[in-house]
Amino acid sequence: MTAVRCYPGIKAREPIGHYIIAYHEPATIMKIFSSAQIKAADAYTIAQEPVSSLQLMERAAEKCAAWLDLHFTPQTPFHIFCGMGNNGGDGWVIARLLLKKGYTVTAYLLHHTTRQSADNAANQQVFREQYPQHVRDIYEVGDFPVLASPCVIVDAIFGTGLNRAIDGWVAGIIHKINDQRNGNTIVAIDIPSGMLADASSLHIPTVKAHHTLSFEFYKLAFLMPENAAIAGEVHVLPIGLHPEYITHTPVRFHLTDPEMIHTIYQPRDPFAHKGTYGHALLIAGSYGKMGAAVLSAKACLHTGAGLVSSYIPECGYNIMQIAEPCAMCITDIHPHYNSHFQEVFRNNETTDQYKCIGIGPGLGTETATAKALEKLLELYNRPMVIDADALNILASYPYLLRKVPPGSILTPHPKEFTRLFGPSANHFDRLELLSQKAVSTQLYILLKGRYTAMACPDGAVYFNPTGNPGMATGGSGDVLTGILTSLLAQGYSPKAALLLGTYLHGMAGDLAAAKYSQEAMAATDIITCLGQAFLYIKGL
Ligand SMILES: NC(=O)C1=CN([C@@H]2O[C@H](COP(=O)(O)OP(=O)(O)OC[C@H]3O[C@@H](n4cnc5c(N)ncnc54)[C@H](OP(=O)(O)O)[C@@H]3O)[C@@H](O)[C@H]2O)[C@@H](O)CC1
Ligand SMILES: Nc1ncnc2c1ncn2[C@@H]1O[C@H](COP(=O)(O)OP(=O)(O)O)[C@@H](O)[C@H]1O
Ligand SMILES: [K+]
């Protein structure tokens, strides 16, 4: 069974994000395989283990039936819609297992093709022989039953074998199922019917599920914002696909998990002094936006940098010194915005005292600021963190992108990403663009979202699972800039800083939501909860 994600001191099922992670089988959750690879994993398992494809189907359906039995009672009637492929085969087995457990079940066969998979045929035959009065056949939309609420609708029509968009009367059935959403529960098996695992399903009819029981792996489609209303809550059920295939098959997409993060995390040296953990500089803030500078400096300190300096305009001096006495302060000659970055440069060189520079939160996009940024990019040669208005400046002067030190991390939200790299037709195209840009610029690019996507210079993309909608509040991104700058200053490699920092940020956000609620939490609460997030990661 899966384990509900749970942090110390917080009961399972608190509002800490809606996904479930199988902690005990990290290798199965970390990689995101394509439909073709999942099919190959299936075949490899059957070839290597003493298990037939029918037994594997039985195993998968047992996991689904156990999940359903845990979440519903026999008082709720089940309507199970089966297609002709192996997804439908799962449906027949689930129907049989639930009937055995005492549930009221009706199974429906959609006659969408004359080619039925062998395992589907075998399981359908067993079901029809044992429970002939529990089967209905569907040949057209008019055959869709009248369902009494509340009931559970199980969608076992199409899985990862979908090879074209659903149309005709089958699309009509999908719409009929979606019409039943209110007052009933729709549970999709493996993937909602109609949804493509590796490509955009925009404008394609799909079942809109409340829950999806996905076998062994997350599908790429589940991580795409455009599919948020289709898959519902995703529950990954391990079905014992062969670990060798999982370990040795290369993938481009990954989901970071706690074990991976624990491996990246480096405990502090007992003999450390403040010089050990680097001096971080945050160039941020302008008149009316000093909060962004304060948030990034505070987050930087609370992530463990040895020293933190904040470079701000004159008007922010008292604000910063009072709000964060642990940070040092350098003020620009301009009262309202950062215009020269003096003190960062000496004799046309950047001083080498700053192990990492983060720039952007609340910075503004004045021409003088843009010029100072250009000079900084020319003179500073360590990986930097570039966020917010610094990204907007890069978008206005695209030639500056080539001057960004290699290994730097860009942290755009979706609008900043579009300003930098142009629009995309859908989120799969945008992901492709993200990966291509990381390769062509040799930078790390972090595209913010529910599952923040982090593209590396080799084209690999890591999705971050932590975080929640409570973080959709002004200043959350400024906190992330502070965290990433701090980790780079401490000596983490850009990739390690990126994966660990983003995970920590989301986890602190989850802890803040559990403590204060998603509605009441603010970006400052994310910083307050960083300590607990560190303790959690250390204790893994
Ligand atoms: N991998 C695993 O670990 C395990 C996987 N398992 C399960 O197998 C599932 C994959 O099964 P699968 O390959 O048989 O494909 P599936 O999704 O049932 O669809 C094929 C059918 O759809 C049809 N069809 C396609 N597109 C269509 C359209 N647009 N409109 C209409 N029809 C369309 C196609 O018909 P045809 O192209 O022949 O007309 C064919 O009949 C997977 O999701 C999981 O549930 C478990 O049992 C065991 C462990
Ligand atoms: N629904 C959500 N689920 C998970 N994380 C979220 C969600 N909404 C926002 N976040 C996170 O909060 C941060 C918001 O950043 P950003 O939009 O730059 O905020 P700001 O500019 O106000 O500081 C990002 O790291 C993003 O991933
Ligand atoms: K399905």
Image (tube, rainbow, N blue to C red):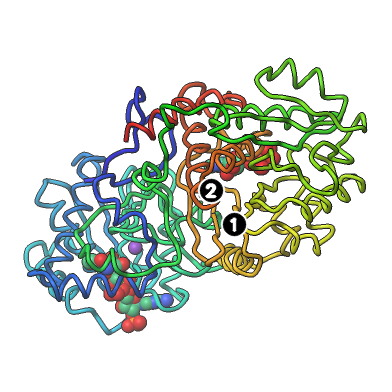
> Residue 202 location, x and y as percent?
56, 65
Q: Are marks 2 and 1 in contact (CB under 8 Å)?
A: yes
Among the 4 quarters of the image, the one containing residue 442: bottom right
User: What residue sits right under mark 2 in the picture?
Assistant: 498
Q: Viewer-proximal residue, 270 or 461?
A: 270
Mark 1 close to ligand 2, CB under 8 Å: no
Q: Viewer-proximal residue, 333 or 92?
A: 333
Mark 2 close to ligand 2, CB under 8 Å: no
In which quadrant is the C terminus drawn? Answer: top left
> Residue 173 location, x and y as percent?
41, 66
Q: Is residue 112 visible?
A: no
> Residue 16 location, x and y as percent?
43, 33
Query: Is 46 above or below relative to 451?
Result: below
Query: In the rendering, which numbered label is found on residue 94?
Result: none
Going from N to C along the chain, the mark reached first, 2 or 1, is: 1
Q: How many marks?
A: 2
- Say what amino acid the circle numbered 2 marks: Leu
Q: Viewer-proximal residue, 302 or 151?
A: 302
Q: Is residue 349 left or right of residue 45?
A: right
> Residue 51 location, x and y as percent?
10, 69
Decide: few, some or many residues near mark 1? Use Cα within 10 Å; few <14, some 14-19, many ≥20. many
Query: In the rendering, which numbered label is found on residue 444?
Result: 1
Decide: few, some or many residues near mark 2? Use Cα within 10 Å; few <14, some 14-19, many ≥20. many
Q: Secondary structure at mark 1?
A: strand
